[in-house]
Amino acid sequence: MMNFSQSGDPNASYSSEDISRLSSSDIEYDYLSKIIIIGPSGVGKSCILHRFIRGDWNVLASQTIGVEFSSKIISIGPSPSPNNINMKLQLWDTAGQERFRSLTRSYYRGSAGVVLVYDVTNKKSFEALHEFMADIQSLTNDTISIAVVGNKADLVSKDGNNGRKNSSSGGNDGPIDPTTVVSDEEVLEFCAYYSREIGYEIPFIKASALLADNINYIFDKLSNMILTKVEIGVIDPEDPLSGVQYGDLSKWDIQSTSSEIANNNNGGQLLRKKPTTISLLNRRATRYTGNSAGSGWGWVCC
């Protein structure tokens, strides 16, 4: 039986301590997915990643130089179960400073997911997201999954009584200027616009690395988006540029008999599949479309 972390989330994840106690067979994963964390400098990207990986607050956080790498296995499913899908996330934390942009852009290629982060108390950091979206559109494939994350939500209360920036929140001492706070409406408009541009819905998530609010949800949501695209055939794990690879072979059923191959009409290719996933056999091209007139979003086949 797998040892799942007791987070209370429907999509439980393995902590570093859990993984260290499990045997190699227990931590096998079904998919490997590459996710990059991008955004302007100082918005808390490294703090989000540290909170997700380590489960605590990084008091000694410093600016990332270049790119830093971490990984974590999460379990995707309604409850801790052997039938859940285990996905190993390769997480690339990129520096936000302009002088590192040429380096960090090289990590966009071959990514399956993007966590795009801004500071909810800094409107300039939000406005800079347009430049990052331009890079995403030009450097990643058209199956990319994106989540826009507003970090430092603990500094902005719903009643308008904003907190103070301090060293523990990743900012300078002093009151927050209400004119620099980014409204939810602005972000939702941003997400709607680029959702129409790329053809996939972009969720907006407010989070706090300091308080651990919605940190696990960011990666659970993005992983589910990626897995959905794999299951309906939008992402092919056999494509080296898709950002997703098959995981441990022992957890997959191999169709190897000539009669099975002939019946599946897959051109003689051996396919791997798991009972809990939608078969990739005879899949049709599928895309996600939205109508600006308000008819809604949905998956359609063409």
Image (cartoon, helix red, strand yellow):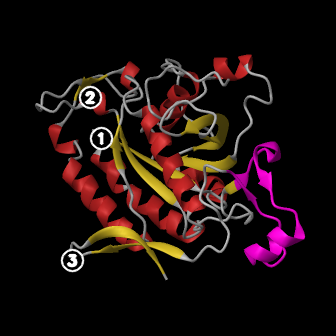
Tell me, yes or no, if residue 51 can be seen here: yes
Q: Is residue 243 left or right of residue 166?
A: right
- Kind of residue at badge 1: Val
Q: Determine whether label 2 and label 3 are within 8 Å by CB.
A: no
| Residue 255 part of the magenta-drawn span | yes
Q: What is the C-alpha distance between the residues marked 2 and 1? A: 8 Å
Image quadrant containing the N terminus: top right
Which of discs 2 and 3 lies nearer the camera? The answer is 3
Residue at 39%, 58% in the rendered image: 202
Q: Residues within 10 Å of mark 2 (few under 14, many from 20)?
A: many
Q: Nearer the viewer, residue 78 or 125?
A: 78
**Residue at disc 3, secondary structure:** loop
Residue that mark 1 sits on = 120
Q: Is residue 110 left or right of residue 186?
A: right
- Kind of residue at badge 3: Ala
Tell me, yes or no, if residue 269 can be seen here: no
Quarter of the view holding residue 151: top left
Q: Determine whether label 3 and label 1 are within 8 Å by CB.
A: no
User: Horizontal and vertical percent for residue 200?
Assistant: 43, 66
**Residue at disc 2, secondary structure:** helix
Which of discs 3 and 1 lies nearer the camera? The answer is 3
Q: Residues within 10 Å of mark 3 (few under 14, many from 20)?
A: few
First in residue order: circle 2 vs circle 1: 1
Q: Determine whether label 2 and label 1 are within 8 Å by CB.
A: yes
| Residue 288 part of the magenta-drawn span | no
Please state the extent of the stretch shown in magenta in the rendering.
245-274
Q: Residues within 10 Å of mark 1 (few under 14, many from 20)?
A: many
User: Horizontal and vertical percent for residue 60?
Assistant: 53, 19
- Kind of residue at badge 2: Leu
Q: What is the C-alpha distance between the residues marked 3 and 1? A: 29 Å
Residue that mark 2 sits on = 155
Residue that mark 3 sits on = 293
